[in-house]
Image (cartoon, rainbow, N blue to C red):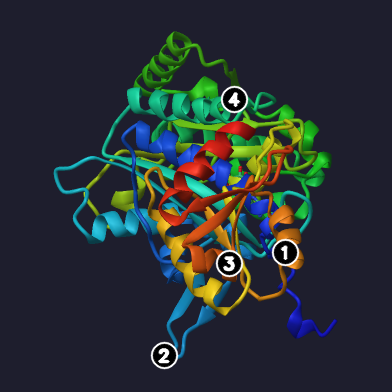
Amino acid sequence: MNQALQAIRGMSDLLPADSARWQAVEGAIRRTLDDYGYREIRVPIVERTELFQRSIGEVTDIVEKEMYTFDDRNGVSITLRPEATAGIVRAAMEHGLLHNQRQKLWCTGPMFRYEKPQKGRYRQFHQFDVEALGFPGPDIDAEIIVMTARIFRTLGIRHVSLQLNSLGSSEDRARYRADLTEYFRAHHDALDEDSRRRLERNPLRILDSKNPAMQAIVAGAPRLTGYLGDDSAAHFAGLRSLLDAAGVAYTVNPRLVRGLDYYGRTVFEWVTDQLGAQGAVCAGGRYDGLVAHLGGEPTPAIGFAIGLERLVELHSLAGHAAAATIPDVYLVAVGDAALLAGLRLAEDLREASPPLRVEFHCGGGGFKAQMRRADRSGAAVAVIIGDDEVQAGTAGVKPLRGDAGQASVPLAGVADAVRRALAGVA
Ligand code: ATP
Ligand code: MG
């Protein structure tokens, strides 16, 4: 096919056959976040490139090689958002939402990263992103994690487990970084190219390496846990006892890191063994340094992002059905006069209380052809209007499942007759 008529590599269409599952998953997350008192914020899909460079950090996979960056027509460098935190923090600062206030926020939508497309990894993908701004924790850290656990439970997804770590304060990490750099320097010959580059600028990122050849060296590296100062240790212990009290199980994984300076203390990730290589479903952490780093008042903050493609896949693997909404009624109208009466009747039924879901037949055709469509629509009842019915001021009400016959009903009684027929098939 002509390439102009094909989607961009790594960017998928969501087809009608799959949208019911997406709506079910998104709806469940949205309701959970609303129930916990988190409020939606929507931010633009593009921001100035500099915002992402400053907030995600120069020495990261995202900024080094994954961003979709363009000059606009005025020569301003803009970037399709690779994640939502930067835009949300920018919006909160710009609109004074952090001025003597705390915020519990969420956002959802497409993110863009120039990655190698494969199952579970795309160039346009979707996240639910949650940020709590102004809370020092560890109570909010626990709430956020408890909330992620509830999202999985609500969706009936069981094969996920929680990994937890503390990155300490920036002073803790400075001492750790010095020892870590020394360790990796001593193993310089065994480091891959990426790791050598990271060694001087951001050695913590080496711990995050996805190259299997690096696993042995990483396993022997000093552990950050041994470097936590008193405050960070108390924060981590506080979080752990809150999670224990809430009955949320976790494993402490000392290799779980974020290589950015303004990330600190709590980091967590939900992982699964059901999705092959792409096992991370939800990742989050505390970034108390970011707002100040962007020029605002120091503001403690924690957030997470759930990857929707991976979550929807888990929902499907768990065997949960997600059926598209089907109409209650398929309205068959044969003839010009019936078309006018039928269109009006359809609107009346949609306004009945309680309202009925009505699919109105468009595209003409005879009675038989329209009834075939009615059958295929999945509706339980057909409402039929032809010239005779128009004359008599009635409509035919015919259950489409079971053997009950067609009844002739005055127009004002159609909604009740449909409801009786629906109750009969239920
Ligand atoms: P990974 O290690 O898989 O690259 P990441 O650390 O880059 O993940 P985050 O930036 O923390 O991911 O994003 C949070 C979640 O978003 C991930 O856990 C994952 O579920 C999802 N995600 C990230 N990148 C992609 C992608 N390219 N395609 C689909 N989902 C993604
Ligand atoms: Mg990534």
- Disc 4 marks a residue whose amino acid type is Leu
Q: Which residue is mark 3?
A: 388
Q: Which mark is residue 405?
A: none
Q: Residue at x 62, y 47 (%)?
A: 381
Q: Which residue is mark 2?
A: 74
**Left or right of 63, for residue 376:** right
Q: Which residue is mark 4?
A: 162
**Chain-order first, disc 1 or disc 3:** 1
- Residue 170 image position (x, y, % from top left): 41, 37
Q: Tag 4's secondary structure?
A: strand
- Disc 2 marks a residue whose amino acid type is Asn
Residue 96 appears anywhere in the view: yes
Q: 352 or 41: which is nearer to us?
A: 352
- Disc 3 marks a residue whose amino acid type is Asp
**Chain-order first, disc 4 or disc 2:** 2
CB atoms of marks 1 and 3 within 8 Å: no
Q: Tag 2's secondary structure?
A: loop
Label 3 to label 4: alpha-carbon separation: 66 Å
